[in-house]
Image (cartoon, helix red, strand yellow):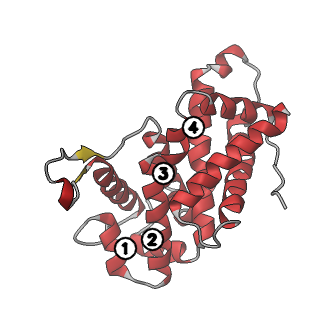
Amino acid sequence: METQRPEVSALAWTLLGIAWKNGRRTTLTSNAALKLCLFVLTDLVIACQEQNISRVIKLTGQPELPRNLLSFVASLSNEIDLKICSRLIPAEQELDAEPVWTSNSDYDHAVFLALGQTLANAAWPGSGSRDLHAPAIKQVLRSLAQCSERDIQVALIQNYVANVLQDYLDRAQARVAVRNAPAAIENEIRKDDCRVIAEFAYKLAISRNPRPAPEELQTGLSTAITRILENKSS
């Protein structure tokens, strides 16, 4: 039976349509940064649950664990960025071929921002309780050990889509045009609409594989966007 297509708010649907029709459909859902962040966060949660510190350190690319959340996020992001920017070595039978660069995209910033937001939400109390001192690394790892793979994957996709839609909302200068727009509109799109999109993407991915790989989650996101857009246009 076909998974029911959820609905999102009219504003979120419009912004999502703009993003999807911007001539970069494939890059929006299948960029290398999103794939690597999904992989790293999933691997990170598993490593924290197993208390495998050496595995966590390897993900940061550092000789030892960073001291707190902020330096931890920076190390993870830097290591992922290095992988994106590294050259692919030609196969043995293609030694005469030129090395090629893995692909950056216009959406990398939204992905890396989502990485930091997802880790902060998992390891740091709500914004009303936060102080100037970022959580120590031991607290970060304990918090991540309480997350499930699903939790972290859905949260990353939610924050990523929210960052993309926020960018298009800012470009449209909606708040300049509509001075009396509700103050919480951006937060509502992130919290409600983008959660719907992320959970739908995950549901589509697990319908094919109970433990979906990053590529399958990205395919789920692509399908979810298509179906949600069709839902209001039909």
Asked if residue 182 is positioned above or below residue 93 in the image, the reply reads: above
**Amino acid type, residue under disc 2 in the picture:** Leu
For the C terminus, the image quarter is: top right
Circle 4 residue: 164
**Amino acid type, residue under disc 1 in the picture:** Val
Residue located 33% across and 50% down the image? 84
Residue located 43% across and 49% down the image? 33
> Who is closer to the viewer here, 26 or 183?
26
Circle 3 residue: 34
Asked if residue 135 is positioned above or below residue 233 in the image, the reply reads: below
For the N terminus, the image quarter is: bottom right
In the picture, residue 225 is in which quadrant? top right
Q: Secondary structure at mark 3?
A: helix
Please, which residue is most extreme toward the left here? 96
Q: CA distance from mark 1 to mark 4?
A: 29 Å
Q: Does 28 sit left or right of 234 as displayed?
A: left
Circle 1 residue: 56
Q: Secondary structure at mark 1?
A: helix
